[in-house]
Image: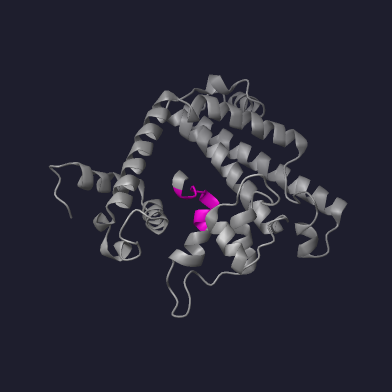
Amino acid sequence: MEPWGGFDHNAQSLRIVTALEQRYAEFDGLNLTWETLEGVVKHNGPLAPRSSPLPTAIADYVRLHDLELNTYASAEAQVASLADDIAYNNHDIDDGLRAGLFGITDLAEVPLVGPMFASVRERYPRIETSRLIHETVRRLIGLMVDDLIAETRRRLAELRPATANDVRRAGKPLAAFSPAMQENDQALKAFLRERMYRHYKLNRMTSKARRLVKDLFQLFVCEPECLPTEWRRRTDGSATLRTARVVADYIAGMTDRFAADEYRRLFDVQSRNS
């Protein structure tokens, strides 16, 4: 999508709930509140000012419906963002260990994580590995949640917001980890980035997925007649910006299995189309 304005995860989410879902007689999209849409776009913080252009879907939408991109999102959206962070990182510890991408001993020097594994093992010296992992991850999630609650309460007491707009214009997030937990979180992310996300096994899978998506995208843009009928009708019938946007929407909505099946149907000459 780079020549056609790029692809952005949050922008695509906004596009889904404001344009692609078609449930109502009088308008496209879902009947969501301003606060929900704001949270979809700004849960990671303000989007303005910025040095790079806004993703097209966001820029197009805010011309019609101002989401105040220079402010923070609601407290609920801020909490949701950090809850996602907590779940993502901790479950990746579990996934990485179970997949054999790294071992428990490799985590020994990671702040918070290594000491927690040691603490659980000390308390339950005969615990089996699967229970050790589950118990440690459970406790790590609990510690991070408790820290988030405590730091958010501290900031509430400091900033004393009286309205939702006070939260948005506070100049910093209201929901946050403490400085110490932020350092722990960054250390864990650095470990996962190096030992999991850049692991050669994941690199191979990522490379395969990248090639699959690229090939599907190029084929559909150049030959939109290969799209399912309801999607083809939304295109210009040729390689235009509108067609590229429709193709991106179609591919973005695929599950991994469907994308692989679609690739096989289109590129395997021995495959029967269905």
| Residue 47 on image: x %, y % | 66, 51
Which residue is rendered at x = 61% and y = 41% of the image? 141
Main secondary structure type of the part rendered in magenta: helix
Q: Position of residue 10 (x, y in %)?
A: 55, 52
- Please tell me which residue is depicted at 49% across the width and 47% down the height of the picture: 6
Instruction: Indicate left or right for 81 with 216 as reference.
Output: right
107 above or below 70?
A: above
Which of the 4 quarters of the picture holds residue 121? top right
Q: Is residue 253 magenta?
A: no
Which residue lies at the image location 34% right of the left edge and 53% below the top edge?
239
Compare residues 198 and 131 and report the one nearer the observer: 198
- Whether residue 128 is visible here, answered yes or no, is no
Would you say 181 lies left or right of 38 here? right
- Where does residue 140 sit, x and y in percent of width and height? 62, 37
Q: Is residue 53 left or right of residue 203?
A: right
Q: Is residue 109 above or below residue 197?
A: above
Most foreground residue, 85 or 149: 85
In-image side of 170 versus 239 (left or right): right
In which image quadrant can residue 73 be found?
A: bottom right
Looking at the rendering, in which quadrant would you find the C terminus?
Answer: bottom left
Residue at x 38% of width, y 32% of height: 207
Q: Is residue 7 magenta?
A: yes
Residue in the foreground of this view, choosing between 202 and 63: 63
Using the rendered image of the protein, determine whether residue 44 is visible from the camera's viewpoint. Answer: yes
Q: Is residue 57 above or below residue 191?
A: below
State the colouring used for the structure image: one colour
Q: In the image shown, does 211 or 40 lie closer to the viewer?
A: 211
Magenta segment range? 4-13
Q: Position of residue 48 (x, y in %)?
A: 69, 52
Circle count = 0
Q: Residue furthest bottom?
A: 26
